[in-house]
DNA sequence: CCTCCTAACTTAATCGTTTTCGTGGTTTAA
DNA sequence: TTAAACCACGAAAACGATTAAGTTAGGAGG
């Protein structure tokens, strides 16, 4: 590998001058700078990030906590596309991305240890168990941190507007004349809590009282689980006129249960999903759903984290809510 | 940050001894080793990977080329789950993963430059334009390289069995009595070529002659494009009895076109996908498809790359084909 | 008793950068 | 003419680790 030393020798100047010339410092003559720049290119010089990091204590590397909880991490479109836009923005700003795991070398340690070992400038928690003590340790360390869809005290968080999203969805189906609205919610997480709040807020505001048996649970991103939940709902003495599913993907299971019961969407029963995945617009009939703005979620998370990294004193931790929008598909019928 | 020096001072030994003690070298006394180990823990020591990399020229970091070609990278289950299992295996072996982009800092360079800058020990090309000169440059550099689904000369590659997969699929539907088999293939890539070969090989072996208009194209992972292609097929004077789609996801578009034509699957027309995504087993009727073994593809790719990294002289570059398997769903009807 | 070996350390160089503090030499101002 | 200011560059000290090459001290062997 060709280093600063090689360039220095070739140009007959010191290593210091070469470094300054390449880094655009001002105290170096224009002719020397040009000479350095051209020989650097000529020799095919590439900087050594390790040496630079060692000296400057900056790696331009961002650690990503992205755990494949129940196999729905990478393959879950919401997380996948958020990560993609995060990566895009980070790279645009000159940062690289490294996954934070629990092992350095062959031995297992904590997330924080791993982050410190790699010397990342900051950490983004995209997909993880937020209540895990090891995650807590990481969040409340000295490292700049941004989290997605979970707000830690005094730390920057980027949140999808789950309350408003669910509320809007309920108001939409209410506007279509539906009163018997069922909600199959997901696992017990902060996200679920928010959506529940949104659901009940809308109901209260609209003067709706929803029987308890209309509120049931399934696992996120698990069509089979959703299939069963849907079946339970359809077996009730008074069936709902509209079912809100936990997410778009689970809807695949739900629609099966509906078809098995000999019902059609939206003629016999209306449904809506949540997420606004690519798939939602492709299925027929088009799924009515709340589209989360993954592109903005990822971009803002990256931008915020970098802001915290580059201006640790002046930037302040904040909780940013990113608005989604209603995708009015064809699965909610107007009741007369 | 606490460094070797701090531990050395506290223990009253030299930095060298501390380093050796922590790295399990043999020429250090048992009592000193214990003392070093315990004070290291006590002070909360974390090694500095940058310093280590600088000295040893090893980063235990693997670069990943994962370009979001036409938005189907991260969100494409095939790539996403291959990447997941790659990451898992790499981490198990003590390696971390960093994405290779085209910019170091604010300026844009080549993939190779970026890889060299970060000093990765090797590179895995999971999802990229294999014909891009910049990719070629990377592949034929000094770095250990493994590629997925594209075989470079003298470099290790892990390949899904596209020829055999497609061949098996054709033989399966042939076995069900189908003779008028259409194939909507994907974009022009090496993968498509292989599947085409498999398709024609099976036809030849079975004595089938497929009319040219039965072979049509759509974009991978793009239901709308597949929708149109399907429509074209259904408008032919003699329609096929079975349509093979480019991939499971595109099937969503295909099924819409079929339903619009007033046909049912599998009663009126049979179909099959390709990939074996999670979704394929969830839709109703269950999709008949060829399941690629993403778990093994990722795992083997990582293991092979690490083998090349750790034994560059003795290990040899090879092209490994990973077998998939037929998922016999419910979308191919037995013809009488 | 002397030599030699070995175990257990230490010394010091080195990896490639960055950055502070000089140091001459030249220009400018008084 | 002289002092101050400025410019372009160099010397050298880090950053934190690894490792080859010494250096002890103590014991074994003759």
Image: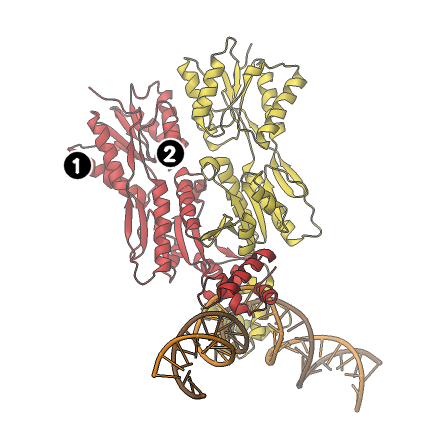
Chain colours: A yellow, B red, C brown, D orange
Q: Secondary structure at mark 1?
A: helix
The answer to whether tags 2 and 1 share a subunit is: yes
- Residue ID at (67%, 18%): A205
Label 1 chain ID? B
Left/right of residue B311 with respect to residue A242 in the rendered view? left
Residue at the top extreme, as displayed: A237
| Residue A266 appears in view | no
Residue D8 to residue B12: above or below: below
Residue placed most toward the observer, B165 or A172: B165
- Residue B249 location in percent, x, y? 39, 32
Q: Secondary structure at mark 2?
A: loop
Q: Quadrant of the N terminus of chain A?
A: bottom left
Q: Looking at the rendered structure, which numbered label has been put on residue B204?
A: 1
Mark 2 or mark 1, which has the lower sequence index?
Answer: 1
Q: Quadrant of the C terminus of chain A?
A: top right
Residue placed most toward the observer, B261 or B237: B261
| Residue A261 appears in view | yes
Residue A225, image quadrant: top left
Q: Which residue bears the numbered disc 2? A: B277
Dot 2 crowding, Cα within 10 Å, few <14, some 14–19, many 20+: many
Residue B126 to residue B36: above or below: above
Residue A139, image quadrant: top right
Dot 1 crowding, Cα within 10 Å, few <14, some 14–19, many 20+: few
- Residue ID at (34%, 25%): B286
Residue B319 to residue B228: above or below: below
């Amino acid at each position: 590998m060709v280093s600063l030393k090689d360039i220095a020798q070739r140009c007959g100047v010191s290593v210091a001058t070469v470094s300054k010339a390449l880094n655009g410092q001002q105290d170096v003559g224009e002719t020397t700078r040009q000479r350095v720049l051209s020989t650097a290119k000529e020799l095919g010089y590439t900087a050594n990030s390790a040496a630079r990091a060692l000296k400057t204590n900056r790696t331009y590397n961002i650690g990503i906590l992205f755990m494949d909880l129940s196999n729905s991490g990478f393959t879950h479109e919401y997380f996948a596309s958020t990560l993609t836009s995060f990566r895009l923005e980070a790279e645009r700003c000159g940062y690289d991305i490294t996954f934070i795991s629990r092992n350095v070398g062959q031995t297992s340690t904590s997330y924080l240890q791993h982050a410190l070992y790699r010397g990342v400038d900051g950490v983004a928690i995209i997909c993880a168990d937020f209540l895990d003590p090891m995650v807590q340790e990481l969040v409340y360390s000295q490292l700049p941190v941004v989290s997605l869809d979970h707000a830690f005290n005094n730390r920057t968080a980027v949140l999808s507007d789950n309350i408003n999203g669910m509320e809007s969805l309920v108001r939409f189906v209410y506007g279509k004349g539906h009163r018997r609205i069922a909600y199959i919610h997901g696992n017990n997480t902060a996200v679920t809590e928010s959506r529940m709040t949104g659901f009940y807020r809308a109901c209260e505001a609209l003067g709706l009282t929803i029987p308890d048996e209309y509120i049931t649970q399934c696992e996120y991103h698990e069509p089979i689980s959703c299939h069963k939940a849907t079946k339970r709902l359809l077996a009730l003495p008074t069936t709902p006129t509209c079912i809100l599913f936990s997410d778009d993907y689970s809807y695949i299971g739900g629609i099966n249960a509906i078809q098995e019961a000999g019902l059609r969407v939206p003629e016999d029963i209306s449904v809506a999903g949540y997420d606004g995945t690519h798939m939602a617009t492709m299925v027929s009939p088009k799924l009515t759903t709340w589209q989360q703005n993954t592109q903005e979620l990822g971009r803002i998370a990256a931008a915020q984290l970098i802001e915290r990294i580059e201006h640790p004193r002046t930037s302040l931790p904040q909780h940013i809510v990113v608005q989604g929008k209603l995708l009015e598909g064809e699965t909610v019928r107007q009741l007369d």
